Amino acid sequence: MLGSWFKKNDGVVVDTHVTRISRRLELTQQEDAPKIEQDLMQIIPRPRWTDFSHEVIWHGRKLCVARSPKCAECALEKLCHAGDKTWSTVEIHMDAKL
Ligand code: SF4
């Protein structure tokens, strides 16, 4: 709210999408939202906190969905080592199934 309306970056929104994607992209190993937020605030520059949250939530709604993420369409695919990828060009994940 503060970030979107008043351009104040007072934290990173951690909803179910941010939780799932942050863990898939190895930005955190935590499961609790407050701990995930702390990890993200350590690695995401403060001016990007609000936009980062919106971008990750959008990514989670459109591509990196909870079940059967659309990895073949994902621009982050080469950087992602998630165990539940559905498609992969990364050598160690070549056995990922469609
Ligand atoms: S490659 Fe797949 S699991 Fe990894 S971020 Fe992209 S959509 Fe999500």
Image (cartoon, rainbow, N blue to C red):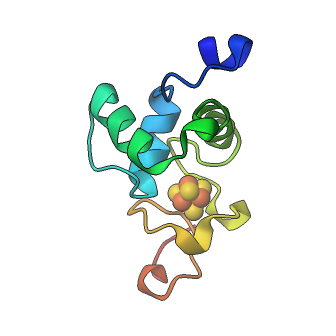
**Residue 72 percent coordinates (x, y):** 68, 66
In this rendering, the answer to whether 63 lies above or below 49 is below
93 over 81 or under it: above or below? below
Tell me the quarter of the picture where residue 71 sits: bottom right
Q: Is residue 26 above or below residue 63?
A: below
Q: Nearer the viewer, residue 34 or 71?
A: 34
Tag count in the figure? 0
Q: What's the residue at 38%, 33% (across, down)?
A: 37
Q: Residue at x 69, y 36 (%)?
A: 58
In the rendered image, the quadrant that contains the C terminus is bottom right
Which sits in the foreground, 67 or 22? 22
Q: Could you tell me residue 27's position as x and y percent? A: 40, 53
Ligand 1 is found in which quarter of the picture? Answer: bottom right
Q: Residue furthest bottom?
A: 91
Residue 77, image x, y percentages: 60, 68
Compared to residue 5, the image places residue 34 above or below, namely below
Q: Quadrant of the N terminus?
A: top right
Name the residue located 46 percent from the left edge and 29 percent from the top edge.
Answer: 16
Residue 62 pos. (x, y %)? 71, 41
Instruction: Tell me which corner region of the image, top left, top right, bottom left or bottom right, holds residue 87.
Output: bottom right
